[in-house]
Image (tube, grey):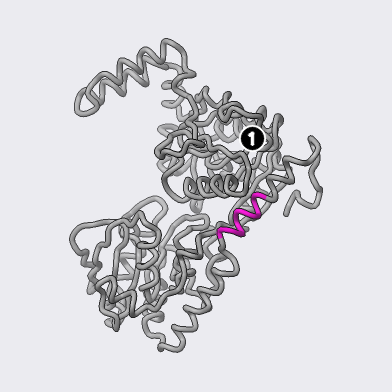
């Protein structure tokens, strides 16, 4: 189960695991809050249909109105204040919204008896967290965390704020996603704590950083097994290729360094270290500033910052095409304020492109500093600039060694087949185990 079948990293991980289970011969189906694809084994959780007749009537009326301009605002008011006024009022108080009645049907949506349920992102306005105890006591429930939302009173990552360990309240950052309009974070934290205490969960995380946070959080009261299972990527797609040949294919100068970054890293977003990255660009030496800088993920005019000109490269929905940009790189730069275990870091390493990234979340576990890339402290433009300058200044032999190290590290650690196999073996073990059985050694695996 996941928030959607198509989307970002968490949605992709969930979809690919679902496909791997089916390919291994299991009768697997995927339940989602929003279905965007056409897979017949993907079903949408019927939250709308499960609402009261009053709520459905008002929502139906809202759907008839123009969904732009004044019509949009009126439709929104009807859906929120008329259809379900108490739900609207609780959200206005800052209480997290768990009112998604279709969740009660989760275990019957596939039509057959369920042996084990694999839960992914539980935020995203589709899942009633209060159903977690009932679900987890009916069948073994594996919960894969992709961020830290379950550990706090509202936010997916708490940045430098530590109140998630002690009960939240007096939140200094209500704006962090998922944002809340008022401070009910202590109420949200206690409600989650009580839900987890009544649950029986097998929790998986992609990195030790998040495992450590789980152990220190109120979620731990409901955890029977905790495993670290790093993400995997398709190493048949993300693999090394001759950099000069790929650069020619992409219309780049094969002789000049190519520096890669996602365009959203230039902006002041919650999770991106945009200010530090822009500051680093302004501090670069002539060699690094004169590299071919590519801002991935957006189209538009070139971006000039200091002596650096970044060419925008649009989104590449085809993984093989996207891999070519990574294969062409001298380095990929990932300036983040918060992150868990970004897929693009693994994909870059697998394409034999070293990574320069900030030391947040699980990123230091992905990159061997000085061997497959460079890890710098977050929020420090000078340190980031020095890391970029140093990468450009490497002689060809040293850079080639970094590239070989990156590809070998990815081959040994980030194979999607290993990722799927680890989960599948665990699922089969849980499904076959007598009710209530769990190996004590697995509790903190």
Residue 219 location (% of width, % of height): 65, 41
Against 243, is 183 above or below?
above
Against 47, is 31 above or below?
below
**Disc 1 packing (10 Å; few <14; some 14–19; many ≥20):** many
Q: Residue at x 64, y 45 (%)?
A: 217
Q: Quadrant of the N terminus?
A: top right
Tell me, yes or no, if residue 272 can be seen here: yes
Magenta stretch holds residue 26:
no
Q: Residue at x 30, y 70 (%)?
A: 281
Q: Which residues are magenta?
A: 416-424
Q: Residue at x 65, y 49 (%)?
A: 424
Q: Which residue is mark 1?
A: 193
Magenta stretch holds residue 423:
yes
Residue 291 location (% of width, % of height): 28, 77
On the picture, is 412 further left or further right than 347?
A: right
Tell me, yes or no, if residue 212 can be seen here: no
Seen from the viewer's position, the closer of residues 326 and 125 is 326
Seen from the viewer's position, the closer of residues 126 and 350 is 350
Local SS, label 1? helix
- Return the residue found at the far top: 54
Q: Residue at x 46, y 32 (%)?
A: 125
Q: Quadrant of residue 89?
A: top left
Seen from the viewer's position, the closer of residues 144 and 115 is 115
Residue 246 location (% of width, % of height): 34, 74
Residue 258 location (% of width, % of height): 32, 75
Magenta stretch mostly in which secondary structure?
helix
Against 108, is 11 above or below?
below
Seen from the viewer's position, the closer of residues 152 and 162 is 152
């Amino acid at each position: 189960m996941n928030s959607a079948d198509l989307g970002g990293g968490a949605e992709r991980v969930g979809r690919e695991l679902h496909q791997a289970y089916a390919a291994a011969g299991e009768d697997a189906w995927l339940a989602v809050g929003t279905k965007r694809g056409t897979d017949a084994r993907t079903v949408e959780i019927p939250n709308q249909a499960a609402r009261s007749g009053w709520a459905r009537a008002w929502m139906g009326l809202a759907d008839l109105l123009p969904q732009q301009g004044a019509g949009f605002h009126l439709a929104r008011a009807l859906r929120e204040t008329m259809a379900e006024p108490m739900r609207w009022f609780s959200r206005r108080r800052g209480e997290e919204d768990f009112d998604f009645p279709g969740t009660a049907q989760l275990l019957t949506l596939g039509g057959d008896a369920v042996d084990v349920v694999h839960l992914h992102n539980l935020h995203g306005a589709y899942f009633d967290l209060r159903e977690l105890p009932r679900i987890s006591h009916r069948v073994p429930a594996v919960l894969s965390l992709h961020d830290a939302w379950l550990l706090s009173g509202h936010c997916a990552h708490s940045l430098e704020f530590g109140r998630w360990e002690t009960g939240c309240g007096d939140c200094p950052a209500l704006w962090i996603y998922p944002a809340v309009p008022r401070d009910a974070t202590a109420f949200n934290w206690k409600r989650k704590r009580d839900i987890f205490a009544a649950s029986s969960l097998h929790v998986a995380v992609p990195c030790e950083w998040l495992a450590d946070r789980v152990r220190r959080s109120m979620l731990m009261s409901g955890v029977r097994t905790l495993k670290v299972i790093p993400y995997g990527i398709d190493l048949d797609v993300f693999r090394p290729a001759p950099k000069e040949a790929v650069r020619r294919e992409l219309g780049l100068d094969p002789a000049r360094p190519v520096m890669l970054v996602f365009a959203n890293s230039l902006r002041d977003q919650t999770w991106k270290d945009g200010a530090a990255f822009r500051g680093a660009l302004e501090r670069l030496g002539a060699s690094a500033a004169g590299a071919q800088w590519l801002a991935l993920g957006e189209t538009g005019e070139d971006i000039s910052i200091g002596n650096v000109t970044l060419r925008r490269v649009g989104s590449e929905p085809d993984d093989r095409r996207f891999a070519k940009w990574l294969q062409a790189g001298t380095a990929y730069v990932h300036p983040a304020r918060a992150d868990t275990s970004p897929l693009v870091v693994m994909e870059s390493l697998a394409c034999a492109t070293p990574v320069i990234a900030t030391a947040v979340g699980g990123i230091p576990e992905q990159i061997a500093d000085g061997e497959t890339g460079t890890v710098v402290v977050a929020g420090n433009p000078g340190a980031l600039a020095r890391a970029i300058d140093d990468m450009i200044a490497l002689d060809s032999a040293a850079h080639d060694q970094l590239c070989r190290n990156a590809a070998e590290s990815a081959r040994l650690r980030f194979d999607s087949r290993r990722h799927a196999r680890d989960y599948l073996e665990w699922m089969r073990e849980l499904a076959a185990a007598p009710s209530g059985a769990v190996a004590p050694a697995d509790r903190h695996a």
